[in-house]
Structures are given as C-alpha cells and as structure tokens.
Amino acid sequence: MALKITITSTKGGVGKTTLCANLAGILADLGQRVLMVDADVQPTLSSYFGLTRRADRGLTNLITEASSDGVISRTEITRLDVVLSDDPAGKLQNWILHQPDGRVRLRHLLARLDDDYDIILVDTQGAVGPLQDAAVLAADLLLSPIPPEILSAREFARGTIQMLERLKPMAFLGAPPAPLKGLVYRMDRTRDARMIATELRRESYAPSRGAISILDTVIPNTVAYREAATHRTPVHRWETRRSGPAPSARETMTDLVHEVFPHLAEQTLAEDQL
C-alpha cells in the first residue's frame, strides 16, 4: 500500500513545493516508485522537473471524473510521476465544496493507486479551503515546513491546530486527520533561529497543544536549494558535498528520508545514481 504524505501549511511561502519536489526526487533515487500530486492552484510543482510524457489531463479530471486514466505525467527522473495542476481559475475548490464526498474523494482515489506506487506526495496551497482539506484528509502523514521565525512559527501552530480541529469530524467518514510533523525549514545561523527551533521542539510549546511533533532533521538556509530549483534538479544531486558547518544537501535530505521513512533507513544513494 502506498504511503500518502501531504505537505501542508496554512501559511504560504514557507517552502512546501520545494520540500515536496526534493523529497520526491531523493525517494525516487532510492528506488521508490513515487507520485507527486500538485494540489495547488499555482502549478509550481507541475513545472519543477522536466517531463518526458505530459498527460492530456490532470488533477481536475482525477477528482471530478474519479478516474486516473490519462492524468499521470512522467518526469525526467526515473520512477517519479506527477499529476499536474490544471485549474488556474480555482473552479475545483467550488466543485469539491458542493459534492457530498468532496473532501474525502481524493483519499479514496489515491488508494486506487496503491499497486502502482510506494509513496504519494501531495503538495498544497497556502490558503485554507476545500482543496487543501481534501489533500490533508488524503494523507497518512502530514508534513509542514516551518521557518524559524517567531511570527511564522506562531501562525503555523495556530492555523494548523485550527485546521486539524475543524477536520476532526471527518473521522466519521473514514478520513481522520493524520499525525502532523513539523520540519524546521530554511534554518539560518542566528541565535533567534536556534532559540525558536528549540522552543518548537518542547512538548509544552503552548500554541501547538502537543498536537505537533517537530523532526530532528533541519533544512538549512543555503543557496543550494535555490540553485537546484533553478536548474530543475533534486537538491541532493546538486550538492553532494559541502565544506563548512552546514551539512550538504545530500546529507540533509538523506537524514530527512531516514527520519520520516524509518523503513528506508538501510537505503543509501550510490554515486552512479547522481
């Protein structure tokens, strides 16, 4: 059965798409069959990597027609496919809102792909709405990047708790909200950033009410992640080694995979994969 992970945050511009693409890229290089689902009206993930085969349709058809036929595109990365965002006007939100099963439909549709993929990663928009709800309720695990900046951290905790509380009744439809893990993202070397990261990890951190666990892995604020995005390549391929106090992108992403997917802890990247 494919493990479904939704990259989500109620705050925009925190790095969800970059995290989703880089995580998908390294998982594919580790031998996993990976599907990315671009559930953002702004189709950044859809164009993150080059395509070797572009499907005629995308997310709109997957959800409204309840069919995966002709909606899966193939990227240039072996074992990595993508369902493209194809709803620039945002009409899918309204469609989901007015369907009895709208918010849980994506969960059941992705379950039909269990035999085709090992891991399914869903990218979401920052704005709260029916499409974000559907993506959250489709997940076995929620992963949220958190910039180590006090206002962003507070907004993350406040908005995320509100979202999870609001979606709790969906458990009666067989779609309980999944556990949520926070990832300190774009960590710089300032004292404030270190203090905020430490505070977030405390179980007593008041805004989260203990509902959020913070991963040990930290994504540093280094230029490699921006450069890799510009060159449309996974960051672990772009920066395999690094001098200085921060670990290389390859080390960081490998640590993240091993922490989020403990069953892959024995998997390592071979040099000829890069």
Image (cartoon, rainbow, N blue to C red):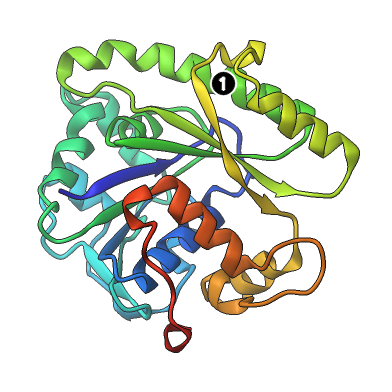
Q: Is residue 147 above or below residue 213?
A: below
Residue at image location 60% in from the left, 33% down from the top: 11
Residue at image location 23% in from the left, 62% down from the top: 57
Asked whether the viewer can see residue 40, the reply is no
Q: Residue furthest front?
A: 266
- Between 128 and 25, which is closer to the camera in this rendering? 25
Of helix, strand and loop, which one carries label 1?
A: helix
Q: Is residue 203 above or below residue 71?
A: above
- Give the percent coordinates (x, y) of residue 48: 49, 68
Q: Which amino acid type is marked by label 1?
A: Gly
- Give the percent coordinates (x, y) of residue 163: 46, 19
- Between 139 and 105, which is closer to the camera in this rendering? 139
- Give the percent coordinates (x, y) of residue 190: 88, 44
Q: Is residue 23 left or right of residue 11?
A: left
Residue placed under numbered mark 1 in the picture: 159
- Give the percent coordinates (x, y) of residue 41: 44, 47
Residue at image location 50% in from the left, 14% down from the top: 162
Q: Is residue 152 above or below residue 63?
A: above
Asked which quadrant contains residue 170, the reply is: top left
Asked whether the viewer can see residue 107, the reply is yes
Asked which quadrant contains residue 202, the reply is: top right
Residue at image location 77% in from the left, 30% down from the top: 196
Q: Is residue 45 left or right of residue 102?
A: right
Q: Is residue 24 above or below residue 8?
A: below
Q: Residue furthest bottom?
A: 272
Badge 1: residue crowd in 10 Å (few <14, some 14–19, many ≥20):
some
